[in-house]
Amino acid sequence: METKKLVMSFKTNDDKKVSLSVDNPREDITEDEIKNAMDLVLAKGVFAPNGAEIVSTLGAKVVATNTSDYDLVIE
């Protein structure tokens, strides 16, 4: 089973990197839409990880993960 996440990275005022992720982003999401969403996060100042303010955007990526389940018999 494959799962996808949109991972958006930001920099805080204490010079640390933080990431926000969104599960199952649309297949047709555009770079402009991602940039606009990141700019909105920055402008609204809603998130303050560990009390630090998000001050800039760093980048974004879609991460796909494949998971294989096995039915193991353990005795």
Image (cartoon, helix red, strand yellow):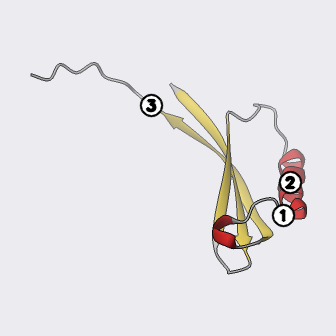
Going from N to C along the chain, the mark reached first, 2 or 3, is 2
Outermost residue toward the left in this view: 75
| Residue 61: % across, % down | 68, 50
* Residue 71 marker: none
Amino acid carrying label 2: it is Lys
Q: Badge 2 local density, few (<14 within 10 Å), some, or many (20+)? A: some
Q: Which numbered disc covers residue 35?
A: 2
C-alpha separation, residue under disc 1 versus residue under disc 3: 35 Å
Which residue is under mark 3? 67
| Foreground of the two, 8 or 52 | 52
Residue drawn at x 72%, y 65% as measured from the top left: 48
Circles 2 and 3: CB atoms closer than 8 Å: no
* Left or right of 9, for residue 67: left
Q: Is residue 35 above or below residue 16?
A: above
- Marks 1 and 3 close (CB-CB < 8 Å): no
The residue lying at 65 percent from left, 64 percent from top is 18
Please tell me which of labels 1 and 2 falls first in the chain.
2
Secondary element at tag 3: loop
- Measuring from the top left, give residue 37's x and y in whole percent: 85, 50
**Of marks 1 and 2, the one in the foreground:** 1
Q: How many marks?
A: 3
Find residue 59 and report its image quarter: bottom right
At a point 75% along the width and 60% down the height, the residue shown is: 47
Check whether the beta carbons of the residues at disc 1 and disc 2 lie within 8 A of each other: no
Identify residue type, mark 1.
Answer: Gly
Three-letter code, disc 3: Thr
Q: Residue furthest bottom?
A: 14
Left or right of 54: which side holds 36? right
Task: Give the quadrant of residue 49.
Answer: bottom right
Q: Going by the image, does 71 lie left or right of 33?
A: left
Q: Which mark is residue 45?
A: 1
Residue 34 higher or lower than 74, as above or below: below
